Amino acid sequence: MSVQVELISIVVLAAMFVIATWRDINMGFLGFIAAAGVGGLVLGQTPEEYLAGFPVDLFLTLVGLTYLFGFAQNNGAIEVLVNWFVRLVGGRAGAMPWIFFALTAILIAFGALFAVAIVAPLALSFARRYKINQFMMGLMVVHGALAGAFSPISVYGIFINDYLTANGFTPSPVSLFFAPLVFNTVFAVAVHLILHRRIGLRAADDDAVEPETGISVRTTSRTRLTTQQVLTLIGLAAMAVSVLVFSWDVGLVTIVIAVVLAIIYPSAGRAAMTKVSWSVVILITGVLTYISVLQSAGTVEWVSAGITAIGIPLLAAALLFYLSGLVSALASSLAIIGVVIALAVPFLESGDVHVGGFVAALAIAATIVDISPFSTNGAMLLANVDATIRDRYYRQMIGYAGLMCLIGPGLAWVVAAVPTALS
């Protein structure tokens, strides 16, 4: 590809952000248009080629999860789960953000790639009910996922350690796990300290719910579960087991369970469909479709090659971390980690940087931005936010993701620089 092609693709990406912000247009629509324009007109791709990056798995996941949890929200099954969690901690609402943080970390550490999708609906429902800051709760869930994401038996951890081994490097699974764990726990502490006393975003009907006291909250009186609630809870349990134990596709599983419920309760099925976050689905799938065209154009590799050509190893590492963070905010973190590690293999073979420190830092830099609504975790979080506050929640996510893009890779660089300086 010529340099002109890569520059055009970057200019189009910047224009997407400007137009979406200026005219309040769903950027997903702009992403589809950009994919067709750059892919078809500049790269000469066919529709099948420039639409090949459409994230079918993520589409099914977003639709399936919001559809299934639409049943749970409408029939009160979510309220039942919230009450159970309240009783679990003895009614101490202040402890719940950390319960959800730990729960998400444990689930993803044991291989649940979509742990945020499982925990976010419960966490946000709890926050909404007791007027806990919903943005803080979302951050706690995402940072929990990132804290446990690189365990030796997680998808992320297995991928990176196996890749290093296959390329002749000795992996450092302990440092790869604990560096992101400590890093995200520190961020979670900061988020909790700053935001936990602020009410934050509230939906139109939130005035009727209980406030957080910081000490204890009342649960609703024990009532007999309805048949629909029982079936919905069984469906949620089946979804969790199928994903965690059998590694089945979370999107297809949730769609199947939701359709079964809709067959039994047709009116409830129609009501649940209104909970599907179509605007979020369009936003995420459109942007990721264009990101795939950027990869086909060689834009990411072009920028990375320029960075790795820098003669100062730690400076090149810092720029690589910032590149991975910025691109990861718009795409799959796992894919970006794979691309950057592949590009950095000659860099690592030179011995100019500590392999374990570099890889751990890369893991942090590429995932700390996952609160972005364009990342998988961020998209799942946004999809479960009440529609009346979703736009404001989206803007807060963009702001926090921007902050993480600014400071996250720089702090991660310290993780890479220290072992190199000591060696």
Image (spheres, grey):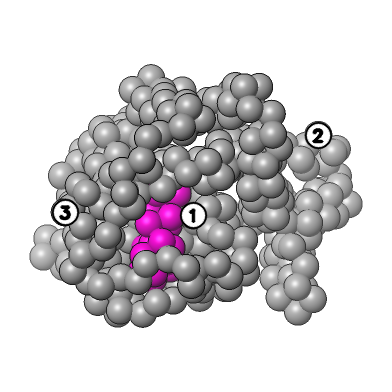
| Residue 137, position as x, y percentages in the image | 37, 63
Marks 1 & 3, CB-CB < 8 Å contact = no
Closer to the camera: disc 3 or disc 2?
A: 3
Q: Secondary structure at mark 1?
A: helix
In the image, the segment drawn in magenta is 120-139
Q: Amino acid at mark 2?
A: Glu
Which corner quadrant of the image does residue 166 belong to? top left
Q: Secondary structure at mark 2?
A: helix
Q: Dot 3 corresponds to which residue?
A: 90
Q: Does 46 lie within the magenta span?
A: no
Residues at marks 3 and 2, CA–CA distance in whole angstroms: 55 Å
| Residue 173, position as x, y percentages in the image | 20, 41
| Residue 96, position as x, y percentages in the image | 26, 58
Q: Which residue occupies the extreme left position in the image?
A: 422
Is 292 situated above or below 132? above
Q: Dot 2 corresponds to which residue?
A: 48
Q: Amino acid at mark 1?
A: Leu
Which corner quadrant of the image does residue 186 belong to? bottom left
Q: Would residue 226 be found to the left or right of residue 62 on screen?
A: left
Task: Work out whether residue 90 or residue 170 is closer to the camera in this orientation and state it.
Answer: 90
Q: Dot 1 corresponds to which residue?
A: 381
At 20% across and 61% down in the image, what residue appears? 92
Task: Work out whether residue 406 or residue 132 is closer to the camera in this orientation and state it.
Answer: 132
Residue 258 visible in the picture: yes
Task: Work out whether residue 245 or residue 385 is closer to the camera in this orientation and state it.
Answer: 385
Nearer-N-terminus badge (1/3)? 3
Task: Work out whether residue 101 or residue 91 is closer to the camera in this orientation and state it.
Answer: 91
Q: Secondary structure at mark 3?
A: loop
